[in-house]
Amino acid sequence: MTAISFGLVSAALAASFAFGMMVQAKRNSKADAKKDVRVTGIGGVFFKAHDAMKLAAWYREHLGITSEGAESGAYHEFEWLEKDDPSKTGGTVWAVFPENAQNFVGSKSPLMIDYRVANLERLLAQLKSEGVPVEDKIEDAPYGRFGHATDPEGNRIEFWEPK
């Protein structure tokens, strides 16, 4: 092998390696960006019932899930410790709503999952850019912010960014 051909092969290998590193860095940055705006946990499980209070009583009697509420529905919060900071508590809400509950409007399902997210606005923007039907309204509450989207089967999804 001559010095010129050795130099060309070396340059080609170096260029190939550099190009491969750039492609991999681009892939990793896209994956990391997506990971930052995705779901971090389950915030709640909500479902409708013909008789919400009667069903809540059934869950209390047979499964030991105590709940608070009135005719507008019943709920229970399961508390747990944050994985990254065990001095902080988190919660997952379980709730039974009456059949006419407004927070299910537009959904084909009597069940709705509430997903915890770290950055609600970024997640909704990401989903919208991916063609997912996203509701424009963001609701502010004392315990966090809420947004909604619809999955391909017509199920309403709730997202919660805790305060």
Image: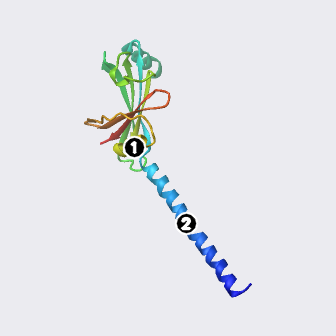
Q: Indicate the quadrant where residue 97 lies.
A: top left
Where residue 22 sits: x, y (%)?
52, 65
Q: Residue furthest right?
A: 1
Quadrant location of the N terminus in the rendered image: bottom right
* Relative horizontal placement of residue 4, taking residue 152 as reference (left or right): right
Tell me the kind of residue under disc 2: Met
- Looking at the rendered structure, the secondary structure element under dot 1 is helix
Quadrant location of the C terminus in the rendered image: top left
Is residue 66 in sight in this rendering? no
Q: Indicate the quadrant where residue 71 lies.
A: top left
Where residue 41 sits: x, y (%)?
44, 40
Is residue 63 in sight in this rendering? yes
Where residue 148 sits: x, y (%)?
37, 33
Q: Indicate the quadrant where residue 155 lies.
A: top left
* Relative horizontal placement of residue 72, taking residue 151 as reference (left or right): left
61 above or below 145?
A: above
* Residue ID for mark 1: 123
Q: Do the numbered discs 2 and 1 sit on residues whose CB atoms are within 8 Å?
A: no
* Residue ID for mark 2: 21
- Looking at the rendered structure, the secondary structure element under dot 2 is helix
Residue pictured at 69% horizontal, 82% vertical: 5
Residue pictured at 46% horizontal, 49% vertical: 34
Residue pictured at 58% horizontal, 72% vertical: 15
Judge the density around disc 1: few (<14), some (14-19), many (≥20) Cα neighbours within 10 Å.
Answer: many
Judge the density around disc 2: few (<14), some (14-19), many (≥20) Cα neighbours within 10 Å.
Answer: few
> In this view of the protein, which residue sits in the foreground, 146 or 105?
105
Tell me the kind of residue under disc 1: Leu
